[in-house]
Amino acid sequence: MVDGEPILEVRGLQKHFGGVHALDGVDMEIYDGEILGIIGPNGSGKTTLFNVIAGVHRPTSGAVTWLGQNITAQPAHSMAGRGIIRTFQQAMAFEDLTVRENVEVACEHRRHSAHDDEVYRGLANPEEIIEFVGLSEFAAEKATNLGFGNLRRLGVGIAIGGHPRLLMADEPAAGLNDNETAELSDLLESISARGVTVAVIDHDMNMMMEICQRLVVLDFGQKIAEGAPDEVRNDPRVLEVYLGEEVGAPTGT
């Protein structure tokens, strides 16, 4: 268990799409400063959980609490203004804008807070953010011309431009090779080291076991396990979900 108070809590979270219960009574906490991993097989509800927390979807029932305030069902722009910012499974950017222009757009829409002043010192302008994510040599390049790995980095840079207190990264390593995944892991850990809380969904279990202090496991919209990576790796319920396979290479969102 992580020490301290959670900055975000979900209680009894449900999201139904017709007869499909994508989330079915999920309780979860995210603690200040941690890197939390959320894993589970295809259709387990991980991305839906992110979407509900970030205001992309309204929950069917349940509550989301942020820094002690009930923020359930507030829209995505309101969540971003509070410092809850997510990336998406698809590597997303304005294709016809340069790397610099993409980050400038994110910075233009940032909401300032005292948290920004402490955590984002040295990342106050687009050039510093671009350097931080390792894209300085591509600053004038249009996003459409970037390789996939660099487009992933740009997505993280755009998120940083919004000055998140909680960064939710949805499959950031999808489509990356081993070297690119290692570099991305270093980047996420560097963001965490600045005091940004990070929640990650990914099916690269080597990465998740390495960078996450805690894992939450979903299956059919329900939380079936949580704990330190070594505890989760050996949990019988988790092993059953992954059909008896070693918890080292599950797939799905």
Image (tube, grey):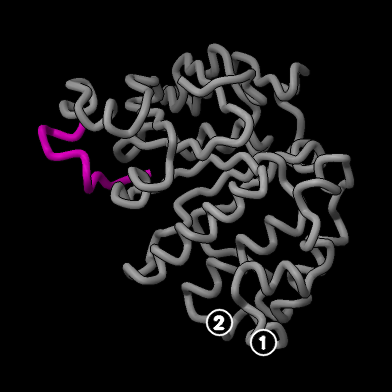
Mark 2 vs mark 1: which is more N-terminal?
1
The residue at 89%/46% (across/down) is 112
Crowding near the residue tagged with mark 2, few <14, some 14–19, many ≥20 C-alpha atoms within 10 Å? some
Secondary structure found at label 1:
loop
Crowding near the residue tagged with mark 1, few <14, some 14–19, many ≥20 C-alpha atoms within 10 Å? some
Tell me the chief SS of the magenta region.
Answer: loop
Task: Please state which amino acid type lies under the numbered disc 2.
Answer: Leu
The residue at 42%/31% (across/down) is 214
The residue at 78%/18% (across/down) is 69
Residue 193, percent across and down? Answer: 60, 48
Judging by the rendered image, the residue that carries numbered circle 1 is 141
User: For residue 249: magenta?
Assistant: yes
Residue 237, percent across and down? Answer: 21, 21
Task: Please state which amino acid type lies under the numbered disc 1.
Answer: Glu
Q: How many marks?
A: 2
Residue 125, percent across and down? Answer: 83, 67
* Left or right, 233 with reference to 143: left
* Left or right, 18 with reference to 7: left
Q: Which residues are magenta?
A: 241-253
Residue 105, percent across and down? Answer: 81, 66
Judging by the rendered image, the residue that carries numbered circle 2 is 146
Circles 2 and 1, Cβ within 8 Å, touching? The answer is: yes
Secondary structure found at label 2:
loop
Which residue is nearer to you in this view: 58 or 223?
223
Q: Find residue 177 and name its label.
A: none
65, above or below 108, in the image: above
The residue at 42%/59% (across/down) is 173
